[in-house]
Every structure is written in structure tokens, then in C-alpha cells.
Amino acid sequence: MKYLSLSIIVCLLAAMSACQKSGVTIDPAQQRAKVDSIVGANIKVVQDSINAACSQRVAQEVPAKADSIVKAQKAAASPVTTPTKK
């Protein structure tokens, strides 16, 4: 327990001293370029994932819908008979 509390204190001191550095500046153009590269890479991954999921869903649902349409067309094409009274 003693080592745990000591390590927490050391981490807090290190974090606080890191925040005190005023000499670290980020050029807005560099920051924008870095963000754009990260976003571009992540967008590509997400688009590929969405396209794969869409293709899989289409492959599963299209045959069922096509069968349903064919069945409905066959039902519409068959003559409707009315029951006759005997």
C-alpha cells in the first residue's frame, strides 16, 4: 500500500510538471496536418467496414426479397376463382 501511494504521488507530480512547460508550442498548420492524416486513415477503415457490412447484408436480403416479389407476381398472375354454390 505504501508503494502504491508513493507511485501515485510520483505520477501526479510528473503530470503536474509536464503541464507547467510553457516552451512547448504546436504550429496550427502542423496540428491540422496531423489531425487530417489521422482522420483520413480512420475514415478509410470505417468506410471499408461499412462497405463490407453492406455487401454482406445485401447478399443475405436480396434473394429473400426477390423470392417474395416472384411469389407475389405468380399469385397475381394466377386466375382468381370464385367459389360456386352447389
Image (spheres, helix red, strand yellow):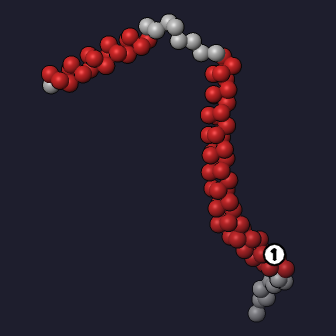
Location of residue 27 with respect to 22 vertically, above or below:
below
Give me the residue at 67% from left, 37% from top.
40
Q: How many marks?
A: 1
Q: Nearer the viewer, residue 10 or 81?
A: 10
Residue 68 showing in the rendered view? no
Q: Judge from the rendering whether residue 76 lies leftward or rightward of residue 54; answer left or right.
A: right
Q: Nearer the viewer, residue 41 or 62?
A: 41
Residue marked by disc 1 = 73
Location of residue 60 with respect to 12 vertically, above or below:
below
Give me the residue at 62% from left, 40% from top.
42
Give me the residue at 53% from left, 12% from top.
24
Location of residue 6 with respect to 56 vertically, above or below:
above
Quadrant in the picture for the C terminus: bottom right
Give me the residue at 35% from left, 15% from top.
14
Residue 17 screen position, x and y as percent: 38, 10
**Is disc 1 placed on a helix, strand or loop?**
helix
Mark 1 belongs to which amino acid? Gln
